[in-house]
């Protein structure tokens, strides 16, 4: 009987050339045009075409068992797929606000303040790392932090009004650290004996290199060269890149939480509990405050808790590193900050220009463009928008170049890039980011107030980043739903690009920590900085691997498997009528919100 069963299975496999199997992304219906969210999944499932593929053994084994033992149940591949199929969704369906929605002013202000808190961590971490080795004092550090926050507000407003118009906050980038360290270690600057004078000369050198490097980004953006390069992108190629935008920042997640587990772990558990498990609890009538404002609530509670631990002497006999990460009075920022101070262009003096410094900084500009491209893709998903077309990406890159130019003129000490800031609240609209800029400037004039926010312990921000960057990575991997992941070609490209995108930068970073220089160590410092910067960036390494492999391995035979029939619609203005959402004119009414000239996106699901 058993031998007869296996003989039946083998004969069935030989005749399975027309059995149903994998569904390809290129044949998907245009689901974003459906306006009824609850019926969308069922309708899409009914419309999905079936492509002929050899059936799996599981269905034939079940049929054979039923044939031998008299079971009349029909365990076919179709029934199995009907149980597990989840049709791809061009736009997320469980968000409350679209990109063109306008929440009430009170809610908008609270969301803007929440974005401000998320932005604060990076804005404090970067100056805290570079200003001391530049020779600066606590007063210099607070001025640099203030300048970063002020210019970030301006750049965010420009990006929301004239750039991609996506809810992406523009702020300081860690991608510029290697060129900055190369400039700091320049022998001509290290010979300056007086620390504050060395700080000023180093800052001017960084300003000059940022100004020159910004010209490269402006040219690539407004000349549409970056848009032409984006024609080589596909869902298969961009999924690892966007995923690595989040996964590549893992060192700023739990490793920093572990520096002070007393407040890092409670913060991580609290933000998960409020934003996920208690999001439907509404203590204030119809307002889901736990779902929309978990950052404000958790940061306030855990910050107060950490202050109680500090005042109670919990860290009095702990190591210096633990005290630095846990104590709320660790910094001399409040006493060093005057009540009023306004940053202005060239506040550190006239910039100095050096060819080697500028070439090194250009590599960081290229890395920031790659990271920003991935962030734009993630922001469009979170904003219930379609992928930004190529010309929109170029426009955003061009305005980001202007932002780097402003960084150089004002002297922020680093360049800027785009990050997704609206992860906790379901609001995905440019107004949140524009109001974020006004909120920046209101607090900016009262330096004592916002400097008190700068002493929030880093593990609190790290706990937020664990969730924020993880969500960005998941959004990136969601692009794989438009590809055929039953293809060994696609599995190879995805796996290799993700693995090398994490492994190669980790090798470069470990080498730097052990040897105080990168693996590329020639007599040309600027050449070293260029290669070490590029290969220390996970998204950049992932882009290089994924795009090269995706455009050289069986390209013509795998267009549908790569997801190109769906992706190609968003390359040009006329490719899809929903591309108009990125060209709709925005206007500012006095004392009110940003308004679209017409509504583009209609997909909205009620709570």
Image: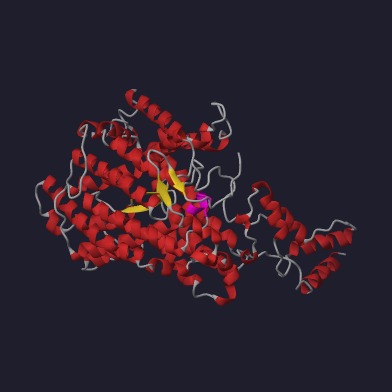
- In the displayed orientation, state which residue is furthest to the left: 193
Q: Is residue 160 above or below residue 111?
A: below
Along the line of sight, which residue is nearer the eye, 265 or 340? Answer: 340
Q: Nearer the viewer, residue 104 or 292?
A: 104
Q: Nearest the camera: 606 or 360?
A: 606
Q: What percent of the width, then of the height, locates residue 143?
A: 22, 41
Question: What colouring does the structure picture have?
Answer: secondary structure
The question of residue 242 being in magenta is answered with no
Q: Position of residue 260 (x, y in %)?
A: 38, 36
- The residue that appears at 31% across and 66% down in the rendered structure is 219
Quarter in which the N terminus is drawn: bottom right
Q: How many marks?
A: 0
Residue range of the region highlighted in magenta in the rendering: 380-385
Residue at the image point whose x is 47% and y is 64% from the top: 497
Residue that lies at the very extreme toward the right in this rendered image: 70
Q: Quadrant of the C terminus?
A: top right
Instruction: Give the residue furthest to the top.
Output: 312
Whether residue 24 is visible to the viewer of this picture, yes or no, is yes
Q: Is residue 171 visible?
A: no
Location of residue 318 in the rendering, given as x and y in whole percent from the top left corner: 32, 32
Residue 363: x percent and y percent? 30, 63
- Quadrant housing residue 563: bottom right
Q: 62 and 414: which one is in front?
A: 414
Q: Is residue 21 left or right of residue 347?
A: right
| Residue at the image point whose x is 10% and y is 52% from the top | 192
Residue drawn at 19 percent across, 38 percent down: 139
Identify whether 445 is placed above or below 409: above
């Amino acid at each position: 009987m058993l031998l007869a069963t296996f003989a039946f299975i083998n004969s069935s496999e030989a005749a399975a050339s027309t059995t149903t199997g994998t569904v390809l992304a290129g044949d998907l219906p245009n689901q974003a045009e459906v306006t009824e969210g609850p019926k969308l999944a069922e309708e899409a499932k009914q419309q999905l075409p079936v492509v002929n593929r050899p059936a799996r053994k599981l269905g034939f084994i079940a049929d054979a068992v039923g044939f031998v033992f008299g079971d009349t149940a029909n365990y076919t591949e179709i029934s199995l797929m009907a149980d597990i199929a989840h049709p791809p969704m061009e736009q997320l369906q469980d968000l409350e606000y679209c990109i063109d929605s306008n929440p009430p002013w009170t809610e908008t202000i609270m969301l803007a303040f929440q974005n401000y808190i998320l932005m604060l961590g990076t804005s404090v971490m970067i100056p805290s790392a570079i200003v001391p080795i530049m020779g600066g004092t606590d007063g210099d550090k607070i001025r640099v932090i203030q300048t970063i926050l002020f210019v970030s507000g301006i750049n965010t407003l420009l990006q929301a009004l004239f750039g991609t118009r996506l809810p992406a906050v523009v702020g300081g980038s860690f991608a510029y650290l290697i060129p900055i360290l190369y400039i700091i270690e320049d022998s001509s600057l290290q010979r300056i004996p007086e620390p504050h004078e060395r700080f000023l000369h180093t800052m001017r050198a960084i300003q000059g290199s940022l100004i020159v490097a910004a010209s490269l980004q402006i040219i690539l953006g407004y000349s549409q060269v970056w848009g032409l390069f984006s024609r080589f992108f596909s869902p298969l190629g961009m999924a690892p890149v966007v995923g690595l935008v989040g996964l590549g920042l893992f060192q700023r997640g739990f490793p920093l939480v572990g520096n002070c587990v007393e407040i890092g772990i409670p913060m991580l558990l609290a933000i998960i509990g409020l934003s996920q498990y208690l999001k439907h609890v509404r203590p204030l009538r119809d307002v889901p405050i736990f779902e929309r404002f978990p950052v404000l609530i958790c940061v306030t509670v855990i910050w107060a808790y950490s202050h109680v631990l500090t005042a109670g002497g919990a860290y009095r006999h702990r190591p210096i590193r633990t005290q630095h990460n846990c104590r709320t009075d660790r910094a001399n920022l409040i006493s060093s900050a005057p009540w009023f101070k306004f940053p202005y262009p060239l506040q550190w003096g006239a910039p100095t220009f050096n060819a080697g410094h500028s070439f090194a900084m250009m590599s960081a500009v290229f890395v920031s463009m790659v990271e920003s491209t991935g962030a734009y893709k993630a922001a469009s998903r979170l904003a219930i928008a379609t992928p930004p077309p190529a010309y929109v990406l170029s426009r955003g890159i061009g305005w980001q170049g202007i932002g780097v130019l402003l960084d150089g003129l004002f002297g922020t000490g680093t360049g800027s890039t785009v990050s997704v800031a609206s992860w906790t609240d379901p609001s995905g609209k440019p107004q949140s980011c524009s109001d974020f800029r006004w909120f920046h400037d209101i607090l900016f004039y009262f330096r004592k107030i916002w400097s008190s926010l700068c002493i929030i312990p880093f593990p609190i921000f790290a706990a937020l980043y664990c969730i924020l960057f993880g969500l960005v990575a998941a959004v990136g991997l969601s692009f794989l739903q438009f590809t055929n992941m039953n293809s060994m070609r696609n599995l190879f490209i995805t796996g290799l690009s993700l693995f090398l995108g994490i492994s190669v930068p980790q090798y470069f970073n470990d080498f730097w920590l052990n040897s105080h220089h990168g693996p590329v160590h020639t007599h040309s410092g600027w050449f070293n900085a260029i290669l070490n910067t590029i290969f220390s960036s996970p998204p950049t390494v992932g882009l290089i691997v994924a795009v090269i492999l995706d455009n050289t391995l069986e390209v013509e035979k795998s267009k549908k498997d790569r997801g190109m029939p769906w992706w190609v619609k968003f390359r040009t203005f006329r490719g899809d009528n929903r591309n108009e959402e990125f060209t709709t004119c925005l206007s500012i009414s006095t004392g009110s919100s940003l308004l679209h000239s017409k509504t583009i996106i209609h997909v909205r699901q009620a709570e």
